[in-house]
Amino acid sequence: MDQQVFGIDELAAELRRVRDQASDEKEILVKVRRLAARAAASKRAWLKDTMYKADAEQGFGVHVLHEEPDHTLAIFAVSWLPDRGTTPHDHGTWAVVVGIDGPEKNEFWERVDDRSRPGYADLRKTGTKIFKDDEVLAMPAGTIHGVWNETDRVTVSLHIYGKHVNYTGRSQYDPEKRTETPFKLKLA
């Protein structure tokens, strides 16, 4: 397939093929990383000005580009307001993110509690990665990260999930208060 015409419909079709043929999550992530890179390289085919709009209250905008009827294989363009982002959170599924326009800072965390107390979570920061345009970040299910736009302009990244994150029962965390709460996105 010609890389110039690798739009969202082509990406969704390839994602379905990978999902149906892969034997495990590791194989899915390897293959989806390549697809995300192709989608980023052909962003002119699908990136629209409206995808830079973000919700001021939420700090970012979530633009659904594709979602299967059963909520699997969701593809979002996410716009990040300057000096805004998210608290640490998980996805409840695997995730692949690629930089489209501007850098994105990711801080990674791990849970160090035994998960026995509802609403309680003790996290330890494990690292930070700033990824730029066309760089791909693959996260297995269970990965906890927070995202921040440290620039003075709106940035955009492409997010691909094994399931729409509002249907996975995912959580957000407050490392200082040691809390875990449900995390649902407001969609654009």
Image (tube, rainbow, N blue to C red):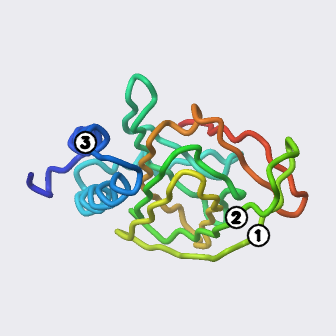
Residue 81 position within the rendered picture, expressed as x and y whole percent measured from the top left: 60, 58
Residue 116 as seen in the image, left or right of residue 149: right
Residue 68 as seen in the image, left or right of residue 167: left
What amino acid type is highlighted by mark number 3?
A: Gln
Residue 57 position within the rendered picture, expressed as x and y whole percent measured from the top left: 71, 45
The residue that mark 3 highlights is 21
| Residue that extends furthest to the left in the rendered view of this protein | 2
User: What kind of element bears circle 3?
Assistant: helix
Residue at point 23%, 38% (across, down): 13
Residue 110 position within the rendered picture, expressed as x and y whole percent measured from the top left: 70, 64
What amino acid type is highlighted by mark number 1?
A: Arg
The residue that mark 1 highlights is 124
- In this rendering, the count of numbered labels is 3
Q: Nearer the viewer, residue 155 or 116?
A: 116
Q: CA distance from mark 2 to mark 1?
A: 5 Å
Instruction: Decide: few, some or many residues near mark 3? Use Cα within 10 Å; few <14, some 14-19, many ≥20.
Output: few
Q: Nearer the viewer, residue 96 or 6?
A: 96
Residue at point 44%, 37% (across, down): 64
Frontmost of labels 3 and 2 is 3
Residue 82 position within the rendered picture, expressed as x and y whole percent measured from the top left: 62, 64
Q: Nearer the viewer, residue 152 or 1?
A: 1
The residue that mark 2 highlights is 110
Frontmost of labels 1 and 3 is 3
Label 3–label 2 contact, CB within 8 A? no
User: What kind of element bears circle 1?
Assistant: strand
Residue at point 65%, 35% (across, down): 169
What amino acid type is highlighted by mark number 2?
A: Glu
Q: CA distance from mark 3 to mark 2?
A: 30 Å
Mark 3 or mark 2: name the one nearer the start of the chain. Answer: 3
* Residue 36 position (above or below residue 149): above
Instruction: Decide: few, some or many residues near mark 1? Use Cα within 10 Å; few <14, some 14-19, many ≥20.
Output: few
